[in-house]
Image: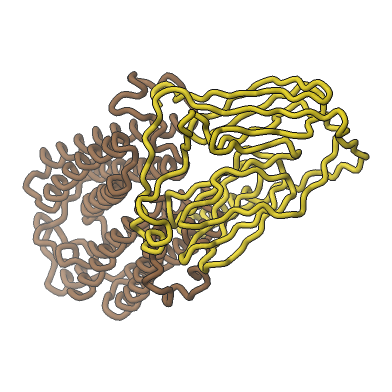
Chain colours: A brown, B yellow
Amino acid sequence: MAWLHRYAKLLAAATLLLVTAGAMVTSTQSGLSVPDWPNTYGYNMFLFPLNKMVGGIFYEHGHRLIASGVGLLTIGLVVFLWKVDPRRWMKRLGLVALGAVILQGTLGGITVLFLLPDAVSISHAGLAQLFFCLTVAIALFTSRSWRTPAAAPVDDARLRRRMVTLTALVYVQILLGATMRHTGAGLAIPDFPWSYGRVLPPMWTWPITIHFAHRMGALVVTIVALANVADIWRRHGGRPEFTRPAWLLITLIATQVSLGALVVLSGKQPIINTLHVATGASVLVTSLVITLRAFRARFADAPVPAARPALSGADAAASAWRTT
Amino acid sequence: MTAPQRVAVFLLAAGLGAAACSAPPPPAATDTTPKKSVDPATAGAIAGRASFEGARPPVETLNMGVDQACVQSSGPNPQSDAVLISDAGGLQNVFVYIKSGLDPGYGFETPTEPVVLDQKGCIYRPRVLGIRVGQPLQIVNDDPTMHNVHALPTLNQEFNKGQPMQGMRETQVFTVPEVPVRFMCNVHNWMAAYVGVVAHPFFAVTDADGRFELKGVPPGTYTLEAWHEKFGTQEMTVTIAPSQSQPADFTFRLAAGG
């Protein structure tokens, strides 16, 4: 199981690299620098000469190669889960991840062949985040701290509600960002923190509206995240499985808001733009990890709290490794 | 159907829907009504100059370092040709054309000779050109490197063609008037060209001194438009008397804050 967990972490890291490479493709407007798919200028994509990876081709073809690597790693994960992990639902989760990465690759191909239709490109961006969530969730579910936690899991319905809300808000915020990005509205409001020198923009076109919605989304996410972290501190301050990612979440959100401002002020400098996407993905999965840990007590194999009547040794073992 | 299946179907449907939205525009209805020709005996001309007033924007040096083939073929210190102003203030690469006012009863034979858009030194040459609806546009890769030719019209069909080999040619035809159609190369992000697609022969691109001439214009009152990629558009009403040559000068300035 330890190797399975390491492998799952490798896949999650590779997926973050893939999301970053994808962001670099859009940030440098290289999405159509390779007009064909699945080939690359007529070459089998794995045989495309490295010395021809110039300009935008470097980003687009590089993104495709990393995506292929992630796809292969995902196939490996499914096999690994099938052989090593006794939990049936984990095997299914692996298959869902595989389906997601296949669909994601197909969407990537469709968006190139149809010259980046907004709906397909935004779906590609949105599914990328969901796949990243899946890989992080699998890494979490295979960790020792998840399988055999040192203490009985926190069972707090309020925390669960608050964290589900935050994670959903972050995802919606990412979708707003993807819509802004793929419809060319990234600089529709050219100043920051004001909007054309005012609190509210003086006019409301579609690009300005989606851009302003993304800014307001950032404000909402920040407020909800701060409230949730304060709640974690107040109610579960002694539980490092919550306080540590909560610190990380606040740090990432502060970084993300700063990057968002810099994206506007730098006129969409590609590296800043890309870091903004990667940090947004990191905010999402950090919020997801806290959310899943808040649900740990609701899983069938959750360890029994010490306050409850003790189970016999055999019952405890059965409870800890229930596979349904 | 499970939730993941529903999501997958939704995403695919969204993709297919978007693809359907990007289907090619329907070809223009063929008008079989006999058309009249311009009488050379009464045709006039519009001749003029586009000039630039004010502080000249700095010339942008192109960084082609991402592709050594471009560095070698472009020569030292390649500069952008987006803004070309002569010493006398003439503005090059302004697309001038009759925007409206032409009697729809006139018919003009569509040339079969292709207009050539070359990629040489990792720059489109020419940067601005005009073409007739239905006239072939031949796009040539004269560079020892890969280009993609990405046309971004709003009325015509968008296309993106790969030209990985030197000497490759690609022919495209635009079906409806549109000024301008932007071309870009996503491999080399400094490359840009603009094509004015017009339904008649009365268009021109200003030369190095900003001059242009539209010949063989039938008598009438027209709206003339001059377009520049950085300085925007200007319009002018021009009346051509029989056999008369009418001057038309445009003066461009930097937009406020530009």
Q: Position of residue A22 (x, y in %)?
A: 37, 56
Q: Is residue A289 left or right of residue B150?
A: left
Residue at (59% x, 28% y) in the render: B49
Residue at (58% x, 66% y) in the render: B168
Location of residue A16 with respect to A225 vertically, above or below: below
Q: Quadrant of residue A276?
A: top left
Q: Nearer the viewer, residue A169 or A197?
A: A197
Question: Is residue A59 in view from this perspective?
Answer: no
Q: Quadrant of residue B196?
A: top right
Q: Nearer the viewer, residue A315 or A157?
A: A157
Q: Is residue A45 left or right of residue A193?
A: right
Residue at (19% x, 66% y) in the render: A143
Q: Can you name the residue that lies furthest to the front here?
A: B88
Q: Nearer the viewer, residue B218 or B153?
A: B218
Q: Nearer the viewer, residue B210 or A109?
A: B210
Instruction: Point out the image quarter for the C terminus of chain B.
Output: top left
Q: Is residue B155 left or right of residue A206?
A: right
Q: Can you name the residue that lies furthest to the bottom here?
A: A83
Residue at (69% x, 36% y) in the render: B203
Q: Position of residue A185 (x, y in %)?
A: 43, 37
Q: Can you name the residue that lies furthest to the left here?
A: A238
Location of residue A101 with respect to B53 vertically, above or below: below
Question: Is residue A86 in view from this perspective?
Answer: yes
Q: Position of residue A49 (x, y in %)?
A: 40, 74
